[in-house]
Image: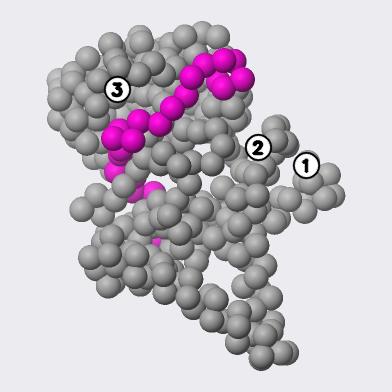
Amino acid sequence: MFFSIIIPLYNRPQEIDELLATLTMQTYTQFEVLVIEDGSVQDAKAIVEGYASQLDLRYFFKPNEGQGFTRNFGFKQAKGDYFVIFDSDCLIPANYLETVKDYLSEHHLDAYGGPDAAHESFTPIQKAISYAMTSPFTTGGIRGNKKHIGQFHPRSFNMGVSRKVWEKVGGFKLTRLGEDIEYSIRIHEAGFKIGLIPEAKVYHKRRTSFAQFYKQLHFFGRARINIYKHFPSELKLVHFFPAFFTLGLIFTLLLNVVYMPLAYICNIIFLFYFGLLFFHAWWVNRSIKVAYLSVVAAFIQLTAYGMGFIQDFVKRVVLNNND
């Protein structure tokens, strides 16, 4: 089994350096790496070419189109039986490809996804963001685990598709705003089998500041409405949770000004929820600092996603304005 690892890259030379370093340590070596620079101003050509003696590696530079279409560019160049997609801000465990190869040898999957986790080298903020995006007490908890809701949709920071999928379904039709979910829905509809490989985890850095994290999650909330516009049946009740959380928080703040008896009850509910997050994050990370930051990260995750969701729900669903 031969893998083609496809990595879109945009102005992140340091990240690709760290990612490629982890790929040199893979215990399964039947793979190539394609790095596609998507019109970056800070190109990483010299850094990538520095790994040419250690990896079967090709570097491409193309005009900026976004990550979805950049992955399609990589698909067209790939030689592998499976195309593996990573984001540039991931670190890959040494046994990743061996784990995937062994799993696919026993369980037929036409496409797969894997979970993400925090690496010990991550900063406290990165660990907190990772917690918020993987916790069972946030909407992140429905991603990358066996008990997902509805069909499993791989996410493009850790996703693989077979050559047969590419030949029949093609690549990404969207370049941003939920492009990975849209793609996996079409793979499902074409009759292919998609599944989670629980042990095929990557260490996903995500964002290095809460401001960047807010911007990213606001984008994710908008992306969910974009998916709905293409596939209405894919909007589930769970996707409304961040919006309900955000509206509930606003309602509670107003009650604290106008009607304290009811505000007291709402305050207790929110305090209980944030306390649950704090103690669970403390247990997971064994750090009070990371636990505190995890509560902040979860708050940002829910409100940013909720605001993005509400914004585009009103604009594109209620007002039917798709400009």
* Residue underneath mark 1: 323
The answer to whether residue 300 is left or right of residue 229 is: left
Question: Mark 3 Cα within 10 Å, few/some/many (few <14, many 20+)?
Answer: some
Which quadrant is home to the N terminus? Answer: top left
The answer to whether residue 163 is left or right of residue 248 is: left
Q: Residue at x 25, y 36 (%)?
A: 92
Q: Nearer the viewer, mark 3 or mark 1?
A: 3
Front-most of residues 323 and 97: 97
SS class, disc 1: loop
Q: Which residues are magenta?
A: 187-209
- Label disc, if present, on residue 103 of the rendered structure: 3
Residue 60 visible in the current orientation: no
Front-most of residues 66 and 279: 279
- Point out residue 230 in the picture as x, y percentages from the top left corner: 70, 32
Determine whether 284 is above or below 202 in the image: below
Image quadrant of residue 25?
top left
Which quadrant is home to the C terminus? Answer: top right
* Residue underneath mark 2: 234
Q: How is the image coloured?
A: one colour
* Amino acid type shown at disc 1: Asp
Q: Are marks 2 and 1 in contact (CB under 8 Å)?
A: no
Residue 199 visible in the current orientation: yes
Determine whether 35 is above or below 247 in the image: above
* Amino acid type shown at disc 3: Tyr
Determine whether 132 is above or below 246 in the image: above
SS class, disc 3: helix
Q: Disc 3 or 1, which lies upstream in sequence?
A: 3
